[in-house]
Structure formats: structure tokens, C-alpha cells
Image (cartoon, helix red, strand yellow):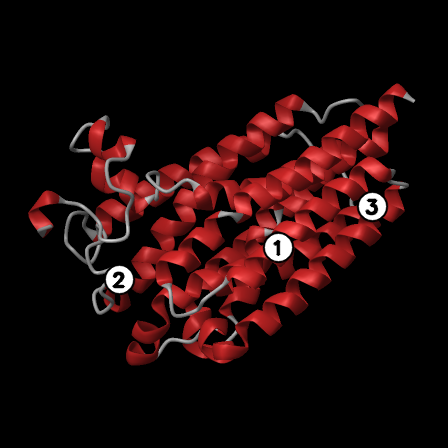
Amino acid sequence: MTMTEGRVADAVRGSWVDTLAPASWRPYLRLARADRPIGSWLLLLPCWWSAAFAAIAAGQALPNLWHMALFAIGAVAMRGAGCTYNDLVDRDIDAMVERTRSRPLPSGQVTGRQAKLFLMAQVVVGALVLLALAKPFAWALGIASIAIIAIYPFMKRITSWPQSVLGLAFSWGALMGWAAAFDRLDAAPILLYAGSILWVIGYDTIYAHQDREDDAIVGVRSTALLFGERTPLFLSLFYSGAVFLFAVALWTLGGSVLAYCGLAAFALHLAWQVARIDIADPALCLRLFKSNRDAGLIFLAGLMAEAALRAAG
């Protein structure tokens, strides 16, 4: 692969961006990671969990489908905006890392000015989604997340725990679904948010093991470097904490066996990740990281079944 082909080393080969998108759009779509939707899924799932929590609390058979659609649009837009912003901040570091040096900014496919304009366009979409939720408290809550997003790219330079800040940002939707429904927060979404933070720290530690050697060379930090060979132990702790907090959140809602069955299946999936991980195998780490979409959907299925049961009863 050469730079003139415009492809990115860690991108999926033969994705719709390569085969269907107009050539002039491809650098921007790659900048937003549109060819790698896993990040959008992982940002979206806490939103959908929270919307399902709200449906259970309200005795509705289904979450608010309008909110679910808005969260899907917002997750794609804000994940793309976050990736664009992160690449603007990290372009010099990305140029030194084998996996990232062919990304649109360090490779020169997109200029800094073009990336900033693209970032603004994505933020506008996110803002329109937030306005469409039509709840003042939800508006304020959504705006508050900007501070966390703004500081995240710098954390790897000053702490070995940048994954915890990512957890704060990627779990924010666990608050938003409930706030969009009730225009307030209660114990259930706060517990869901706390558990989701631990889940994110776990799966992003797995992801960070792909870059462990390069990160050490360029001088950036991560929980992958911090934990090293102890990663399975720490994954067990974070994932166990997430499952416990989710269980307490369900208890506050008066959850039935269906919700807890979904949570148990989610927990088994996380246990499988811990048993399977080999930090010396980057390809395996990527597969395990991506599998968290399936884990999240399993938990969502249990919540949806709980909502249907509650409404029927």
C-alpha cells in the first residue's frame, strides 16, 4: 500500500468507504472512522441502555423510538467529531506510529483547516440532535459532556489512565437516555453510568494493547502499558465491577428475571474475553475489543424483554 492510494493501515479493507463512496469523500469518511463503525456502536449502546431503563421505569413496552433514532444519528456524528478532534490533536504522534501514520491528517490527505471545518460540521449535527430531544435538562447535560471530550486527547500525555477519561465520555449516553425521557437524573442511570465507565476502561485497555510498543517508544501512556501481564486480572476487576453496578441499577428499577438473564449473558461474554485474551496478539485484541458490541446488544436485549414484560403485566 502506498500513500497515494489514500488508504489507512488499520482500516478495514474493501469497506463501503473504499468501494462506494466518492473518492473526494473518502479522506473525510476515514477521518470520522466511518469505515469502522465499532466506535459508534460503543458510544450508542449506553444511550440505548438508558432509554430502555426509562421504558422499564415508565412501564412502556418499548423505549422511545424517536429518541433511539436520534441517539443513533448523534452517536455517529459525535464519534466522528471526536475522532476528527483527536486526530487534530495527535497528528504529530500519529505520524510516528506505524498503525496510524497513514491516517488522513499525518499523511496529508486532509489539511488541518479542512479537518477543522469537517469537525464543525459534525458538531452542528450533534447539536441539532441534542435540540431535538426537547428537554432543557438533557440539553444542559449534553453540553456538559463537551468538557470531557475536549480534555481526552491530552490525557495519554499526563496519566496512565486515559481509558478512564474515555470511559467518562463514552458512557455519557447512560445518562442521556433517562434525561431525555424524564428531564432529570435518578439513581438507576447514575449507577448505569458508573458501571459503563468500568466496562469502557476494560474494553479500551484491550484495544490499547495493539499500540503498546509504539506508545512506549513515543512516550504516551495507557492502562495497557500500566497493567502489562496483569491485564487479565484488571479486566476481571473492571468487568466484575461493571456487572455489579448494572445489577444494582436493575434492582433500583425492580428488575425481573429477564433483565438479570440478559445481564448474566453479558457477564459471561465479558468472562470469555478475559479467558481468551493474549496481549501479545494484536489481531486477537482487536477482535475481542470489537466483540463488546455483541456484549452490549445482549444486555440491551435483556432490557427490552424486561420492558415488554413490565408493560404486559
Give x and y (percent) for residue 181.
Answer: 74, 32
The residue at the point 58 percent across, 47 percent down is 143
Amino acid of disc 2: Arg
44 lies left or right of 176: left
Which is more toward the observer, 273 or 188?
Answer: 273
Give x and y (percent) for residue 161.
Answer: 53, 73
Amino acid of disc 3: Leu
Quadrant of the drawing holding the C terminus? top right
Q: Residues within 10 Å of mark 1 (few under 14, many from 20)?
A: many
Mark seen at residue 91: 2
Q: Is residue 209 above or below residue 144?
A: below
The residue at the point 44 percent across, 77 percent down is 225
Mark seen at residue 250: 3
The residues tagged by marks 1 and 3 sit, at their Cα atoms, a distance apart of: 18 Å
157 lies left or right of 180: left
Give x and y (percent) for residue 186.
Answer: 82, 47
Residue beneath disc 1: 270
Are dots 1 and 3 in contact, CB under 8 Å? no
Foreground tag (1 vs 3): 1
Regarding residue 176, the answer to whether it shows in the image is yes
User: Does label 3 or label 2 sit earlier along the sequence?
Assistant: 2
Which is more toward the observer, 260 or 43?
Answer: 260
- Element type at marker 3? helix
Q: Quadrant of residue 57?
A: top right
The residue at the point 73 percent across, 46 percent down is 263
User: Does label 1 or label 2 sit earlier along the sequence?
Assistant: 2
